[in-house]
């Protein structure tokens, strides 16, 4: 079932929503790559275009699907070494699309080291910005009155999320 661009499934998984948004972002990226040249624009300009045109597609509805992402699962762990953390973050489909674009801008092979690509460009994983948006949303919902329909819907989502297999509290992800 698709509601406001987010795909919902009967089992409550939002993986399908992430897949659809990532596919839309990849299509938009492919169109953009055909129209521009890496030699004609600086890396800064290419990333500005990506941040303006593609990132909003990839991050649409993050407050809904981000808690079920691989990166959110990593945040719930007590101690994680940086390599494992980065591998789990890159396992998310929107982050794979982002990293693929970074490697295209740099002109390196798709199997180039991820941390080197992030370091060379000075960019952070997209999922960090996603969780920043989620924190802002969570703070805004907390400030709403209990009679607000948005606050009630968010509380229902929290309760449903806690029933899932992770058994982690919503605040663990924020």
Image (spheres, rainbow, N blue to C red):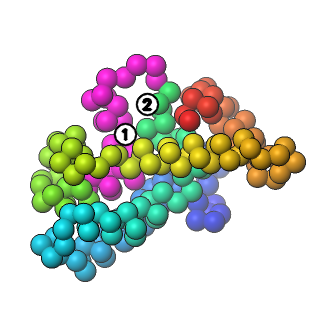
Q: Residue furthest top?
A: 79
- Please name whichever residue, 165 or 122, is drawn nearer the observer in this view of the structure: 122
Q: Residue furthest bottom?
A: 35
Q: Residue furthest right?
A: 147
Residue that appears at 83% across and 51% down? 148
Q: Which residue is mark 1?
A: 89
User: Helix, strand or loop at disc 2?
Assistant: helix
Measured as percent of width and height from the top left, residue 133 is found at: 53, 49
In the rendered structure, which segment of residues is drawn in magenta? 77-100
Quadrant, the N terminus = bottom right
Left or right of 95: which side holds 120?
Answer: left
Is residue 150 a member of the stretch shown in magenta? Answer: no
Label 1–label 2 contact, CB within 8 A: yes
Left or right of 138: which side holds 127?
Answer: left
Left or right of 118: which side holds 96?
Answer: right
Give the quadrant of residue 167.
Answer: top right
Measured as percent of width and height from the top left, residue 64 is found at: 60, 50
Mark 1 burial class by Cα count in 10 Å: few <14, some 14-19, many 20+ = many
Residue 110, numbered circle: none
Dominant SS of magenta comes to: helix
User: Helix, strand or loop at disc 1?
Assistant: helix
Give the quadrant of residue 74.
Answer: top left
* Vertical relation: 2 (above or below) 119: below
Q: Which residue is mark 2?
A: 74
């Amino acid at each position: 079932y698709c509601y406001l661009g987010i795909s919902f499934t009967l089992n409550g998984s939002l993986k399908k929503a992430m897949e659809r948004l990532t596919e839309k972002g990849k299509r938009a990226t492919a169109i953009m790559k055909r129209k521009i040249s890496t030699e004609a624009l600086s890396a800064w300009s290419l990333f500005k275009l990506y941040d303006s045109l593609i990132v909003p597609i990839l991050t649409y509805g993050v407050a809904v699907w981000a808690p079920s992402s691989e990166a959110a699962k990593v945040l719930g762990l007590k101690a994680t070494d940086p390599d494992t953390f980065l591998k789990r973050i890159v396992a998310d489909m929107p982050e794979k699309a982002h990293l693929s674009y970074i490697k295209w801008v740099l002109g390196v092979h798709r199997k180039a080291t991820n941390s080197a690509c992030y370091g060379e460009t000075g960019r952070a994983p997209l999922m960090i910005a996603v969780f920043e948006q989620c924190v802002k949303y969570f703070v805004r919902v907390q400030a709403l009155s209990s009679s607000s329909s948005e606050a009630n819907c968010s509380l229902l989502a929290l309760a449903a999320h806690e029933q899932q297999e992770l058994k982690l509290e919503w605040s663990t992800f924020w």
